Image (spheres, rainbow, N blue to C red):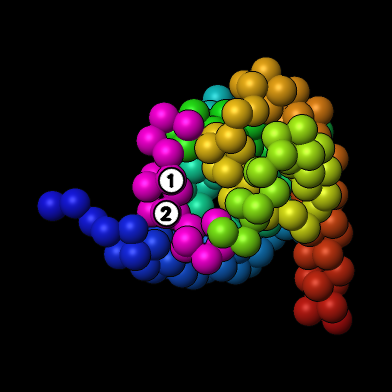
């Protein structure tokens, strides 16, 4: 049985809510274990996950770009918290870039019907006006990828509908993503530390 675009979006919304609740529960559990506040406990927790952990995390990041059932900000924070600022950034970067390439390919291969399974037509129409001029869209897309608050996933799908060359898309993602990933990752990390500091008082 084939799901309609509207039913697919509803299913994704439900999965997003469930994933968010599970993640919140895990964060509370990990906080009680002390791995947010004790580096030694964090290292001990991850000691038997040196290979599987990073691979699984990169896979999660790929999936959350292609099928956004996990809030992107939460997974970015998780990368830095569990793997440290350097490797957490690397795993976030690799997973998000690979996911961005996959979603570009799927959008180009299957077109608008594929995108409408993930976002509403209203959301798509909001940005599709920028595609009328390819050169302007390329610049608009590049600026949005660098900007922290832009709807990256929607724009990556939209880029697949345009005449943008893959290598143009590739270099925009490769060169633009590090800035937003770093801004989100470390902003959320220090924000979380600040909140936990308040709760501990």
The extreme left residue here reads: 1
Residue carrying label 1: 112
Looking at the picture, tell me which residue is in the foreground, 198 or 45: 198
> What residue is at 78 percent from the left and 44 percent from the top?
140
Asked whether the beta carbons under mark 2 and mark 1 sit within 8 Å of each other, the answer is yes
- Residue at 66%, 64% (x, y): give it: 31
At x 23% / y 56%, what residue is drawn? 3
Instruction: Describe residue 43's horizontal placement relative to residue 125 as left or right.
Output: right
Tell me if mark 2 has few (under 14), some (14-19) or many (20+) residues whose alpha carbon lies within 10 angstroms of its own: some
Q: x, y percentage for residue 41?
A: 69, 49
Can residue 61 be seen from the camera position used here?
no
* Left or right: residue 196 compared with residue 28: right
Task: Please state the horizontal and vertical placement of residue 94, each as a whole percent of the image.
Answer: 65, 29
The quadrant the C terminus occupies is bottom right
| Rendered location of residue 11, percent (x, y) | 34, 63
Question: In the displayed structure, would residue 32 be above or below residue 112?
Answer: below
23 lies above or below 61? below
Label at residue 78: none
Residue assigned mark 2:
116
User: Which residue corresponds to the image point at 67% horizontal and 18% vertical from the top-left?
Assistant: 167
Q: Is residue 133 magenta?
A: no
Q: Considering depth in this image, is 131 or 174 the residue closer to the camera?
A: 131
Q: Which residues are magenta?
A: 108-124
Count of numbered marks: 2
Element on which disc 1 rests? helix
Give the dominant element type of the magenta stretch: helix, strand or loop.
Answer: helix
Q: Secondary structure at mark 2?
A: helix
Q: Tell me the CA gap for discs 2 and 1.
A: 6 Å
The residue carrying pointer 1 sits among few (fewer than 14), some (14 to 19) or many (20 or more) residues within 10 Å by Cα, namely some
Q: Is residue 65 above or below residue 100?
A: below
- The quadrant in which residue 35 appears is bottom right
In this rendering, does residue 158 appear at all? yes
């Amino acid at each position: 049985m084939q799901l309609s675009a509207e039913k697919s979006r509803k299913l994704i919304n439900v999965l997003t809510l469930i994933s968010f609740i599970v993640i919140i529960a895990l964060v509370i559990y990990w906080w009680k274990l002390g791995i947010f506040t004790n580096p030694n406990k964090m290292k001990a927790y991850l000691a038997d996950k040196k290979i599987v952990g990073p691979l699984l995390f990169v896979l999660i990041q790929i999936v959350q770009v292609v099928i956004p059932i996990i809030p992107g900000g939460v997974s970015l924070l998780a990368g830095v918290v569990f793997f440290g600022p350097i490797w957490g950034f690397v795993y976030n970067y690799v997973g998000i870039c690979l996911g961005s390439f996959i979603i570009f390919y799927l959008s180009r291969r299957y077109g608008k019907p594929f995108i409408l399974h993930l976002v509403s037509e209203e959301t798509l129409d909001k940005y599709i006006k920028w595609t009328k001029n390819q050169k302007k869209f390329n610049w608009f897309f590049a600026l949005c990828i660098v900007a922290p608050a832009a709807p990256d996933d929607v724009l990556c799908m939209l880029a697949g509908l345009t005449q943008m060359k893959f290598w143009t898309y590739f270099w925009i993602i490769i060169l633009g993503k590090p800035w937003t990933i770093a801004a989100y990752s470390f902003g959320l990390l220090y924000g979380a530390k600040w909140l936990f500091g308040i709760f501990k008082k």
